[in-house]
Image: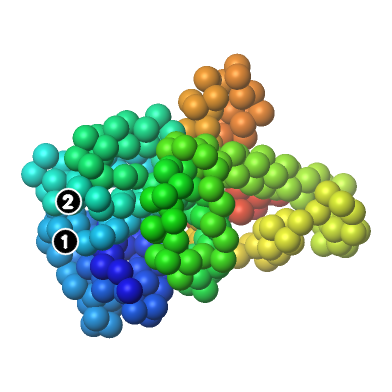
């Protein structure tokens, strides 16, 4: 088993770290709010005060934080950043959803210290993180990925090598852009069906027999029709991912569809829905908000 540091113990990170511990890896953990580590420490993880302290002496250092700015702070802070505590030959695994341009910058900084970066971003939400069924979309060196596979295998059901560093970030943004477009369309259609006096469930059950349907639509429809918006993937995080996608594409004119959908999720944030599950966007169209 490997020595692993895990940085960021939010809804996703805490579940991923718990699975590493269950699999027998020697785990060191850090979180900005130290109390988030208590349960893991009680189960055998080693706590640390800073990312730098957490990273020291470990073969792999994983991060799961909210955005580019948080990633920069965790890895490259001049005093407490993880990179300052890492030895040459360590593999850094960044699983946060980030912009490709930042991932490449981070890889450049790490390479100067002899550290290899994998942008091993995940498809899946908290249920998949808890059940170790995440899909990893990985950018980086194939040999480094081979080294990291025993760690990633206990967290996910699939590991997909998308290409050189930055490709994992591109694959994740593409995945979430498709999800966002689909989700916004579903929300609008539910609003249309209600205004037409139709039974949305019955109509969408009919649509589900076609090739256009998928399991995600089934789950999202249930959430929208039941008004169950307990956060698994909050509106504000999907808006951030769509914003990164538009910027990566080259701006609004280069990605007009994704840009328009990002605007829908920004509107949801403006109407105080940002901390709810992404499916809460339906309330913009069905008269529920």
Q: Is residue 226 visible?
A: yes
Quadrant in which the N terminus is drawn: bottom left
Residue 72, quarter of picture: top left
Judge by depth and name the residue closer to the eye, 230 or 49: 49
Q: Are marks 2 and 1 in contact (CB under 8 Å)?
A: yes
The image shows residue 36 at horizontal and vertical percentages of: 26, 68
Judge by depth and name the residue closer to the eye, 42 or 240: 42
Q: Residues within 10 Å of mark 2 (few under 14, many from 20)?
A: some
Judging from the image, what secondary structure is the residue with disc 1 in? loop
Query: Label 2 to label 1, Cα distance in Å?
Result: 7 Å
Judging from the image, what secondary structure is the residue with disc 2 in? loop
Judge by depth and name the residue closer to the eye, 92 or 102: 92
User: At 24% from the left edge and 81% from the top edge, which residue is drawn?
Assistant: 44
Task: Please give the residue where the numbered disc 1 appears in the rendered image.
Answer: 57
Q: Earlier in the sequence, mark 2 or mark 1?
A: 1
Q: Residue furthest left?
A: 79
Residue 54, quarter of picture: bottom left
User: At 37% from the left edge and 72% from the top edge, which residue is drawn?
Assistant: 20
Q: Which mark is residue 87?
A: 2
The image shows residue 83 at horizontal and vertical percentages of: 19, 46
Image mark count: 2
């Amino acid at each position: 088993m490997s020595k692993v540091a895990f940085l960021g113990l939010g809804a996703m990170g805490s579940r991923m770290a718990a699975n590493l511990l269950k699999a027998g890896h020697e785990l060191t953990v850090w979180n900005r709010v130290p109390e988030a580590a208590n349960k893991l420490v009680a189960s055998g993880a080693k706590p640390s005060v800073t990312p730098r302290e957490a990273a020291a002496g470990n073969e792999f250092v994983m991060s799961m934080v909210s955005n580019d700015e948080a990633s920069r702070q965790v890895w490259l802070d001049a005093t407490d950043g993880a990179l300052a505590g890492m030895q040459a030959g360590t593999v850094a695994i960044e699983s946060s959803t980030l912009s490709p341009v930042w991932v490449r910058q981070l890889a450049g900084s790490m390479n100067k210290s002899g550290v290899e970066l994998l942008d091993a971003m995940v498809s899946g939400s908290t249920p998949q993180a808890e059940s170790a069924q995440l899909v990893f979309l990985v950018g980086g060196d194939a040999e480094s990925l081979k080294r990291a596979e025993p760690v990633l295998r206990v967290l996910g059901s699939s590991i997909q090598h998308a290409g050189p560093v930055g490709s994992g970030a591109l694959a994740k943004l593409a995945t979430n852009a498709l999800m966002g477009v689909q989700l916004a369309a579903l929300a609008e259609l539910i609003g249309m069906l209600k205004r037409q006096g139709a039974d949305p469930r019955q109509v969408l059950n009919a649509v589900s027999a076609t090739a256009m349907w998928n399991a995600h639509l089934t789950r999202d429809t249930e959430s929208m029709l039941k008004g169950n918006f307990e956060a698994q993937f909050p509106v504000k995080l999907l808006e951030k991912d769509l914003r990164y996608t538009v910027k990566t594409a080259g701006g609004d004119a280069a990605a007009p569809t994704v840009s328009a959908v990002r605007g829908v999720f920004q509107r949801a944030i403006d109407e105080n829905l940002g901390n709810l599950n992404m499916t809460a966007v339906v309330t913009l169209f069905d008269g529920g908000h």
